């Protein structure tokens, strides 16, 4: 991590790790916006170049569709992969590496003289530009946490959406202008100056990743990033693209391969320790999964118009690439305006419903478009889709940020784009099928009927999604995004004797005061660890510690937090597997006091479990020991914050807290619901060690930290 005097970073880092001054100033957000816009602008700028490329290379226009699908396929895989790599190696490193790859791709495309070379350039562009969005989302979240914000300011996330959504629609206009002026190669060489500027801004404006790169052995690295999961995901998408690209001819072998690889992928990911595609999370977190589907379907509809209408304007209406792109300018302007308006709102349900309605209106209007339709009417139709694109992109991104686990935000953000690209791949197949016998009015109307079906499905999904309404109620009752988190309110309870402690707080950069981040109980789990008679008897004041654990449990019940009971117990086979050199557990086996099924190893009777609670039995000290399913269960429930309480401080609390910190959970430790047989060890850990990884609080602080909407 850079020191306070490191002048190589744009903003100096305080002792607490928070940047001084405005944490979301132009120097920080400008490279993020520019980097995140590279992928959507390359997705759309090519639309007006396809006809010119086909003429220059003496190939049918239909053959150029692979320049669209190759970028989408690459991006669909590379977006979540870049997110995972950003989580593993640091978001700034991956962001800079991606922009550098775009520079290389711009050179390759500019010098290409064959379709194969252009495909290579588009694949490189897809891989490089895919780093921008997930790395930016991760950088923004980390900057918010460093600054002590409950969430980044809405305009920051809104700006990220606006640049992405607007460039999709403005791309054809820019492409038409460039191609009309400098030829089709402009669609590739434009990446060189843009990427160069983005690279300079990133190096100057984004602080270096604080953690050193750790590769480890190739096998360990492949396991950490789930290389097999990435390859399986890529294989299934490739087979799916081959099937879609062959339409209207049905390529059954490709479809069978896609389904078989998808099934194998799901089976593998259910067993993977750190899955690339977290199937359990997608199943358990319905709100997040529906966001992916809704985003993919909405973008499918938008891209069908973007590509289908552009080709129709050039061929059926006889417009030049420049004229066709110019007609889409209002679409780009309204995309930006709609994104800006929606980004200022905390609620998302009504913007998403409006987005679906507008998509349906645009689809129906397209049914009546034809060669004799006035140009002004066609522009009005594109404008409707601009409103849809802007509102949908921002609202879906907001839902993603709210629902995705913080530790996996990079991968989750990449998956949001992946579903969008799957929709885009499908849109290219729809357009290719409709125009396979030539670009005509009837083909455009076929596209419109598909759009009607898509928009109706999106509308039904959105209206029936009750989680959107609940999320709106919850988040509108929270402090505005970007506001600093309130610290704990003074307790009105009688003062109880507690061990001395040093609290770790985030620094308010304006006032210099210290605050504790607020809790979102819906994404928080209370871990009550080793509250068992066999352990309670070894610590001082067991009744008092147990009573405070009960208070924390009551808080979790009242506010909707997840509850996890962790207990240590050895079945007969577990005891047989303990090696003699394991001092702690070999002694326990010899004494027989950790035997599973006895009253001594059960959770204390005063801490009553309920149906939705999770109980974890472990055979080693840490709650995250390899033989427990705690990690997978927390992921499946969307938990990104842990409140720890347990016995003893130097045992389960120490090992679990350090492991959870390494996995990027937000951590709170209940000092008065934790104890150790050695009071001095307890004091040192609380004052000298734990504050570097967790917020040290008391059970009385929990009520003030809750932000749940009752």
Image (cartoon, rainbow, N blue to C red):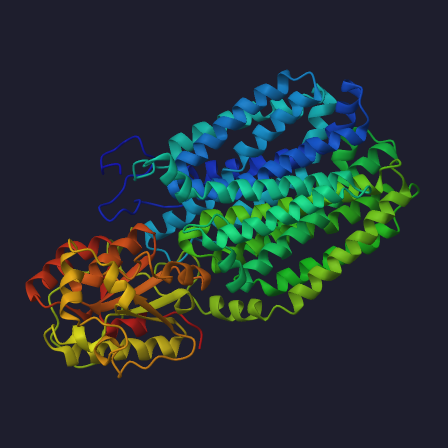
Nearer to the camera, 68 or 157:
68
Position of residue 573 measured from the top left corner of the image (x, y, whole percent): 29, 64
Residue 375's image quarter? top right
Name the residue rendered at 31%, 44% in the picture. Answer: 19
Residue 164's image quarter? top right
As drawn, 654 above or below 254? below
Numbered-mark total:
0
Position of residue 65 measured from the top left corner of the image (x, y, whole percent): 74, 33
Residue 492 in sight here:
no
Name the residue rendered at 53%, 32% in the picture. Answer: 128
Nearer to the camera, 394 or 568:
568
Q: Is residue 153 left or right of residue 208?
A: right
Residue 395's image quarter? bottom right
As drawn, 674 above or below 289? below
Name the residue rendered at 89%, 51% in the picture. Answer: 368
Q: Which quadrant holds the C terminus?
A: bottom left
Position of residue 448 measured from the top left corner of the image (x, y, whole percent): 82, 50
As drawn, 98 above or below 350? above
Position of residue 74 measured from the top left corner of the image (x, y, whole percent): 59, 36
As drawn, 607 above or below 260? below
Q: Which quadrant holds the N terminus?
A: top left
């Amino acid at each position: 991590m850079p020191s306070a005097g490191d002048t190589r970073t744009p903003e100096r880092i305080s002792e607490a790790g928070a940047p001084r001054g405005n944490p979301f100033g132009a120097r920080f957000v400008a490279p993020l916006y520019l980097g995140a816009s590279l992928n959507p602008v390359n997705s759309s700028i090519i639309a007006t170049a396809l006809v010119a490329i086909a003429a220059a290379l003496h190939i049918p226009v239909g053959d150029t569709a692979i320049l669209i699908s190759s970028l989408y396929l690459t991006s669909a895989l590379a977006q979540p992969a870049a997110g995972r790599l950003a989580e593993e190696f640091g978001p700034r490193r991956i962001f800079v590496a991606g922009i550098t790859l775009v520079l290389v791709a711009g050179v390759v495309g500019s010098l290409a003289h064959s379709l194969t070379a252009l495909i290579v350039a588009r694949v490189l562009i897809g891989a490089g530009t895919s780093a921008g969005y997930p790395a930016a989302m991760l950088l923004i979240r980390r900057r918010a946490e460093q600054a002590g914000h409950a969430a980044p300011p809405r305009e920051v996330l809104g700006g990220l959406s606006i640049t992405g959504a607007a460039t999709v629609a403005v791309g054809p206009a820019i492409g038409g202008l460039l191609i009309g002026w400098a030829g089709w190669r402009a669609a590739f060489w434009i990446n060189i100056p843009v990427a160069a500027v983005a690279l300079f801004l990133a190096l100057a404006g984004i602080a270096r990743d604080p953690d050193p790169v750790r590769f480890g052995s190739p096998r360990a690295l492949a396991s950490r990033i789930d290389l097999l999961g990435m390859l399986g995901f890529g294989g299934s998408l490739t087979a799916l693209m081959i099937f879609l690209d062959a339409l209207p001819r049905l390529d059954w072998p490709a479809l069978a391969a896609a389904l078989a690889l998808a099934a194998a992928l799901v089976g593998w990911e259910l067993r993977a320790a750190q899955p690339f595609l977290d199937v359990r999370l997608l199943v358990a977190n319905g709100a997040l999964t529906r966001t992916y589907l809704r985003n993919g379907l909405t973008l499918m509809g938008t891209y069908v118009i973007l590509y289908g209408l552009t080709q129709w304007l050039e061929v059926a209406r006889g417009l030049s690439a420049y004229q066709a792109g110019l007609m889409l300018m209002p679409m780009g302007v309204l995309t930006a305006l709609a994104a800006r308006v929606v980004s200022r709102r905390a609620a998302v349900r009504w913007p998403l419903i409006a987005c679906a309605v507008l998509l349906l209106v645009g689809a129906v209007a397209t049914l009546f478009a034809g060669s004799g339709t006035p140009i002004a009417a066609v522009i009005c139709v594109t404008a409707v889709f601009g409103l849809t694109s802007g509102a949908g992109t921002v609202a879906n991104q907001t839902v993603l940020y709210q629902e995705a686990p913080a530790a996996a935000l990079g991968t989750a953000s990449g998956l949001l784009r992946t579903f969008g690209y799957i929709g885009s791949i499908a849109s290219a197949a729809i357009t290719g099928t409709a125009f396979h016998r030539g670009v005509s009015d009837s083909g455009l109307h076929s596209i419109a009927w598909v759009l009607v079906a898509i928009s109706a499905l999106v509308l039904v999904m959105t209206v029936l999604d009750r989680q959107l309404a609940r999320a709106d109620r919850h988040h509108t009752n929270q402090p505005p995004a970007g506001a600093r988190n309130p610290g704990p309110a003074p307790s009105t309870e009688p003062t109880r004797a507690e061990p001395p402690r040093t609290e770790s707080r985030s620094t308010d950069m304006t006032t210099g005061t210290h605050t504790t981040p607020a809790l979102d109980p819906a994404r928080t789990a209370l871990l009550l660890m080793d509250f068992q008679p066999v352990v309670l008897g070894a610590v001082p004041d067991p009744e008092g510690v147990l009573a405070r654990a009960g208070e924390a449990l009551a808080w979790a019940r009242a506010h909707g937090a997840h509850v996890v009971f962790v207990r240590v117990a050895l079945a007969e086979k577990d005891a047989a597997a303990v090696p003699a050199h394991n001092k702690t557990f070999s002694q326990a086996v010899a004494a027989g006091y950790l035997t599973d099924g006895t009253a001594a190893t059960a959770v204390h009777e005063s801490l009553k479990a309920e149906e939705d609670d999770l109980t974890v039995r472990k055979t080693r000290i840490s709650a995250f020991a390899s033989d427990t399913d705690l990690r997978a269960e927390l992921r499946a429930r969307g938990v990104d914050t842990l409140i720890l309480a347990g016995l003893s401080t130097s045992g389960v609390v120490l090992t679990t807290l350090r492991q959870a910190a390494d996995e990027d959970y937000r951590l709170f430790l209940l000092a008065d619901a934790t104890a150790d047989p050695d009071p001095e060890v307890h004091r040192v850990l609380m004052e000298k060690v734990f504050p570097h990884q967790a917020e040290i609080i008391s059970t009385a602080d929990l009520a003030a930290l809750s932000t749940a909407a009752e």
